[in-house]
Amino acid sequence: MGNQRHLRNALLAIWLIFICKGVFYSLLTPLWDGFDEYAHFSFIQYVALHHELPLPDTRVSREIDRSLELAPLASTVVSTLGSHTDHDAYWKLAPQDRAARQTDLLKIPSDAQYEQGENPLYEGKQAPLYYWLMTPFYQLARTTNLPNRVFLFRIINVCLASFVIPIAFLTSRQIFATDRAGLFVCLLIAAMPELYIDTSRVGNQSLAMILFGIFAFSSFRIAHDDIAYLPIAGITVGLLLLTKAYGLAAVPPLALLAALTVITAPEARRPRALIASAGALVGAIVIPTWWYLRNVRLVGAIIWADGAPEKKMTLSEILRHVPRVNWSMAANSFVGSHLWFGNWSSLTVRSWMYDVFQFVALIAAGGLVLLVIRGMRRQPPEKPVLVARRDLFVCLSIYGTFLAASAYHVLMNSINIPIDATPGWYLYAVVIPEAILVVAGLLAFKWGKEMVTATVVFFFALEMYATHFVLIPYYSGLIWHAPDGGLRSFHVSQLNQIGLAELLARLEINRPVFATNVVLLTAWCAFLIASTLLVYFAVKWAVRAVQIR
């Protein structure tokens, strides 16, 4: 009983830590600096107010257009939209001009929500499930000012994303011989700073991550001969396909699990296995089919954009383009933007910081190879296998097919844009299998617990540096881009130029009305305490014989 209480308290503590950190990032990130945030928000707004799905030529509202003119934007957004103001130029404006812009943004007429603007609602290509779910919340908040509404959906996303913690633990508990390993998985997920950047914005990524998590949990149950989870897995994949196009990456693992269930089922259970497998496939196909048929009717393809070459190409022509892709550059970009990438402003940290985590990943990969080799040997009863081969197979199939889908996206981007890259933050959709693989790989070694703890500490150090020496200085105008595009370094002595009161005042710009100095400082303190607690728990569970199975 005491063991279960300790376990429950530990899990709740990590869950609360996740929420505290997510709230801080929601307050810190300026309006529209989240990846594609204004377009995701516009989709919610359009569905809530017009009660229909957007078409390929649908525009954002006049309210959004006006906000884009008044708020500082990432330079990549400015280059796309035209005559707007990026963060560097915004902080060169006179204080009274910045104040006037903030006042005008808060005074945008509410009727402007209903009026069509000029910029395209390009995220209308997204599947609609997330936006439908957000519609009731928008109806409740539509009379408040724009920053308040944006913050509301950021908090909803953080709370939704936080369910990754209990789902990760329940999934890990099926795989590892000890609950401590499951808690290490949760600690690792909660320590990843880019995960908060990705989920504390308005967008459908949080829902996709949770659905992928449920799919992973169901897949492991199926692998452990609980075929009742096959229909659940199929329905989850169907909902995932109604959330993100990359949900297609879950179809091959589902089909493989369904086939293996039928093949390996005893003769007496085979009819039940056939029915369950058929139910899974039917659920995955029937639920989203109408959406993809609608896309074919509207644009002639199952996905509006990114899913196929924009110009007509044969399969052989596409394959001939594969060796032309700079895969090394694409991999570096993918890994870097997965580890830490500062929102739409494309902020980065020192290159050696990324190298540290790539080294950890190599060690974990080596550990996974060891686990596979050990799994081929007969283990004595007193030395149970850390992770069974079938569980590794399931984990690798989910994670591997997502990596393959990401590589395909690189290929399409190379053909269409052309840029040899794809966003690494998409990989957080399968963060549960990823964290399980990393923890399993590290625990394969004698000093595994210490290496997991060191990884959590590395993430802590990365987050503290990136937050206090990159994000906060950049969002408050203390640092800016040099003519060559590089970001100038921040020095603590620069705080003397403006003082704490002015720093906080700058961080309040275009935030919700309640984001006062006290609120910002409280959120920052909670963020520091929560991040430090992750390190404390990791060290404690690594070196002490705590009451965890």
Image (spheres, rainbow, N blue to C red):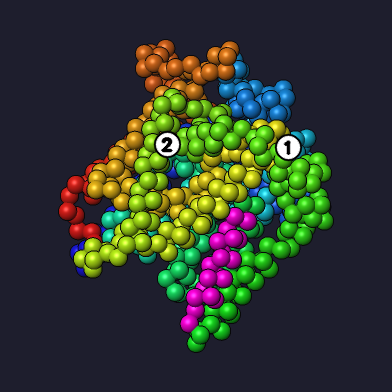
In this orientation, which residue lies closer to the viewer: 12 or 460? 460
Name of the residue lying farthest toward the bottom: 268
Q: Look at mark 1 in the image and give the residue it sits on.
A: 416
Is 87 situated left or right of 474 in this image?
right
Query: In the figure, 494 relative to 533: above or below?
Result: above
Query: In the figure, 211 relative to 44: above or below?
Result: below
Disc 2 from disc 1: Cα separation: 29 Å
Expressed as whole percent of the image width and height from the top left, the position of residue 509 reads 53, 28
Displayed quadrant of residue 294: bottom right
Q: Look at mark 2 in the image and give the residue it sits on.
A: 358
Label 2: state its secondary structure.
helix
Q: Looking at the image, which residue is at 49% across and 75% down?
A: 264
Where the N terminus falls, by quadrant? bottom left
Which region of the structure is painted magenta?
Answer: 247-266
Answer whether labels 2 and 1 touch (C-beta < 8 Å): no
Q: Looking at the image, which residue is at 55% across and 33% down?
A: 328
Is residue 186 visible in this depiction of the protein?
no
Expressed as whole percent of the image width and height from the top left, the position of residue 384 reads 27, 64
In this orientation, which residue lies closer to the viewer: 152 or 284? 284
Where the C terminus falls, by quadrant? bottom left
In reply to whether residue 254 is colored magenta, the answer given is yes
Expressed as whole percent of the image width and height from the top left, the position of residue 490 reads 42, 18
